[in-house]
Amino acid sequence: MAKGYWVAHVDVHDPQAYEAYRAANAVAFAKYGARFLVRGAPQTQVEGACRARTVVIEFPSLQAAHDCYNSPEYQAAKALRDPVSTGDCLIVEGYEG
């Protein structure tokens, strides 16, 4: 079974308030087996446009990635994030090639 991934590009407008989101999202991520592969590390933009922060989160399956995003736990965390950041997030199935 292929893994699922969240890939997010985020601009944080209030880093202090964003910390509340980071603390709150840990509940959903633990519940759905999330593992951070990239979490806001320094990045070099080589093509196109992108936001200041990139996050890649691995889940045991594509279904787990969707279930986590739609869970009450994550939606509560997201409500803390939305007013203090702007972002793009997609859920994608891993390649088993």
Image (cartoon, helix red, strand yellow):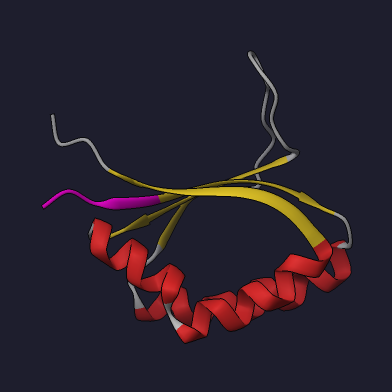
- Res. 65 image quadrant: bottom left
Q: What stretch is highlighted in magenta?
A: 1-5
Residue 38 visible from this viewpoint? no
Toward the top, the furthest residue is 47
Say if residue 8 shows up in the picture: yes
Q: Nearer the viewer, residue 41 or 2?
A: 2
Q: Which residue lies at the image location 66% right of the left edge and 71% below the top edge?
A: 22
Query: Looking at the rendering, which quadrant does residue 23 occupy?
Result: bottom right
Q: Is the magenta stretch mostly helix, strand or loop?
A: loop
Q: Where is residue 62 in the image (x, y as percent from the top left)?
A: 26, 56
Q: How many labels does the image show?
A: 0
- Say if 37 sits above or below 42 in the image: below
| Figure check: 29 above or below 57 | below
| Residue 54 relative to residue 17: left or right | left
Q: Residue at x 25, y 64 (%)?
A: 63
The structure residue drawn at horizontal position 73% and vertical position 76%, both measured from the top left corner, is: 80
Compared across the picture, whether 42 is left or right of 71 comes to right
Q: In x, y percent, where is residue 59?
A: 32, 60
- Image quarter of the C terminus: top left
> Does 39 lie within the magenta span?
no
Quadrant in which residue 79 is drawn = bottom right
Q: Residue at x 72, y 69 (%)?
A: 81
